[in-house]
């Protein structure tokens, strides 16, 4: 998956000071959380909606 330069820069800023070593690792984490989150029981619809909203704000979807 290719990210725009702007989105890549936004991700780089977000991962500063975190455990993520690269933008690729960060994006994989986000996608995994969304995909696996749909499979988990007990995740509230509000939490799912919030995560989707945040991903859209980052340029996903």
Image (cartoon, rainbow, N blue to C red):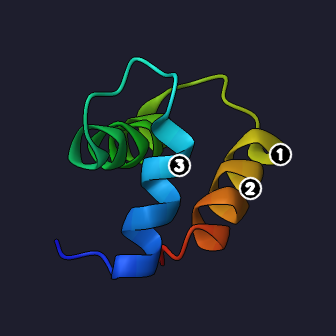
Q: Which residue is mark 1?
A: 46
| Residue 3 badge | none
Number of labels in the image equals 3
Q: Residue at x 19, y 76 (%)?
A: 2
**Circle 1 Cα neighbour tier, 10 Å, few/some/many (<14 / 14–19 / ≥20):** few
Foreground tag (2 vs 3) = 3
Q: Indicate the position of residue 54 as horizontal and vertical percent values.
A: 68, 58
Evaluate if marks 1 and 3 touch, with contact meaning CB atoms under 8 Å apart: no
Q: Nearer the viewer, residue 29 or 52?
A: 29
**Circle 2 Cα neighbour tier, 10 Å, few/some/many (<14 / 14–19 / ≥20):** few
Q: Which residue is mark 3?
A: 13
Q: Nearer the viewer, residue 44 or 54?
A: 54
- Quarter of the image for residue 25 reads top left
Q: Which residue is mark 2?
A: 49
Q: CA distance from mark 1 to mark 3?
A: 27 Å
Helix, strand, or loop for circle 1? helix
Q: Indicate the position of residue 9 as horizontal and vertical percent values.
A: 44, 64
Q: Indicate the position of residue 43 as horizontal and vertical percent values.
A: 66, 29
Q: Nearer the viewer, residue 60 or 43?
A: 60
Q: Residue at x 22, y 48 (%)?
A: 24
Q: CA distance from mark 2 to mark 1?
A: 5 Å
Evaluate if marks 2 and 1 touch, with contact meaning CB atoms under 8 Å apart: yes
Helix, strand, or loop for circle 3? helix
Q: Earlier in the sequence, mark 1 or mark 3?
A: 3
- Quarter of the image for residue 56 reads bottom right
Q: Is the N terminus in the top left, top right, bottom left or bottom right quadrant?
A: bottom left
Q: CA distance from mark 2 to mark 3?
A: 24 Å
Q: Is residue 18 above or below residue 27?
A: above
**Circle 3 Cα neighbour tier, 10 Å, few/some/many (<14 / 14–19 / ≥20):** few
Helix, strand, or loop for circle 2? helix
């Amino acid at each position: 998956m290719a990210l725009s330069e702007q989105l890549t820069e936004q991700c780089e800023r977000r991962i500063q000071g975190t455990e993520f070593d690269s933008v690729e690792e960060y994006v994989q984490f986000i996608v995994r959380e969304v995909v696996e989150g749909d499979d988990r029981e007990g995740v509230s619809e509000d939490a799912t909606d919030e995560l989707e909203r945040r991903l859209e704000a980052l340029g996903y979807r």
